[in-house]
Image (cartoon, helix red, strand yellow):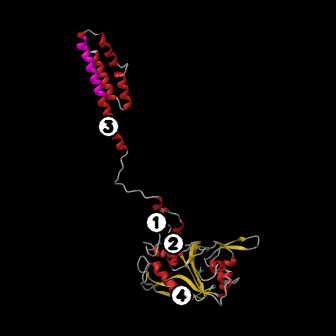
Amino acid sequence: MSELETLERTLLADIDAAGDEGSIEAVRIGALGKKGSISELLKTLGTMTPEERQTRGAQINALKTTVADAITARKSALKDLAIAERLARETVDISLPVRSSPAERGRIHPISQIVDEITAIFGDMGFSIAEGPDIETDYYNFTALNFPEGHPAREMHDTFFFNEDDKGERKVLRTHTSPVQIRTMEAQDPPIRIIIPGKTYRQDSDATHSPMFHQVEGLVVDKSANVANMRWVLEEFCKAFFEVDKVTMRFRPSFFPFTEPSFEVDIQCDRSGPIVKFGEGTDWMEILGCGMVHPNVLRSGGLDPDEYQGFAWGMGLDRIAMLKYGMPDLRDFFNADVRWMNHYGFRPLDMPTLFGGLSA
Ligand code: DAH
């Protein structure tokens, strides 16, 4: 094989082996650059005899053309390859579902949902929200609510007591949301129309009781509030909350120190199926306690019972949430299990409203 043929083979092999634009450029400089192997050969043309130039000269020129063409072809092939690779790398699978944003993936706890629903209903009736501390004095939790010292009704509450402080006072974890009634009466003049959602505490724990639970309290005080008003408010609430057109409620006489008269309220329902249905059936389920605010409680709040009267109610939220959303065990509410939350939780962007639907 002639020396030119060997050179051609080597160069073509190098061109073939060049994997990117950098290495093909290196091959080009090595062959056709100023001091490249082919350029050096071309320089010898001037020293040749006319005969040599015709044969060997033509061979060198042919070699130059072959190698230059091969380099151009390889360069353009490498460019196409680079584009194809980039397209493959940047491929977007448009058939994949869009991943939802964190705000859409999070879930609202059923208790927060219930509070939002109740707030939407009473907000629509012109009520506002009041809040108070979880750690209460004995005075607000009991005495001001007409539980005299040593009264047996205090025992019913299975209270969590704190140790005595320097003043000899034992604070409590509030056993109900009712103390906020007193705090509100002290802070604002009638007419008062508030609901008080919040955490409450009693020493109790099983499938339907937890030592920390939730209540919503309601309080209306003005110069003419009466049992008929109370009944209407509670019926409207139950219809809206259970999302039914009609409810039948039963007001049973009961006793609470802070109301007179006092009632426990049952709602008619059908418990024959797997979930409780409201507004139909022949069963009754107790859902709240209520009554006309006791004159002593109005006095504790700084109001004259000869001028003002009011009604109030208190309701356990956890049980109502279990009923409405068919959750069998209350303890799961507080286990912080994301699987439970994904199943029973609510979508954060679906705010409950009366016009848009509460739990839709
Ligand atoms: N505080 C009561 C409880 O925890 C519930 C209650 C009953 C609240 C009647 C009221 C009421 O405001 O009028 O058992």
Assess mark 4: CB under 8 A from ligand 1?
no
- Quadrant in which the N terminus is drawn: top left
The local secondary structure at tag 4 comes to helix
Residue indicated by mark 4? 229
Q: Are marks 1 and 3 in contact (CB under 8 Å)?
A: no
Mark 1: amino acid = Leu
Q: Earlier in the sequence, mark 2 or mark 1?
A: 2
| CA–CA distance in space, label 1 to label 3 | 48 Å
Query: Is 104 within the magenta?
Result: no
Is 263 on the left-hand or right-hand side of 57?
Answer: right
Q: Earlier in the sequence, mark 2 or mark 4?
A: 2
Residue indicated by mark 1? 349
The local secondary structure at tag 1 comes to loop
| CA–CA distance in space, label 2 to label 1 | 12 Å
Q: Position of residue 329 (x, y in %)?
A: 50, 71
Q: Earlier in the sequence, mark 2 or mark 3?
A: 3
Q: Are marks 1 and 4 in contact (CB under 8 Å)?
A: no
Label 1 neighbourhood size at 10 Å, few (<14), some (14-19), many (20+)? few
Residue indicated by mark 2? 116
The quarter of the image that holds ligand 1 is bottom right
Q: Earlier in the sequence, mark 3 or mark 4?
A: 3
- The residues colored magenta run 52-71
Is 96 on the left-hand or right-hand side of 319?
Answer: left
| CA–CA distance in space, label 2 to label 3 | 60 Å
Residue indicated by mark 3? 80
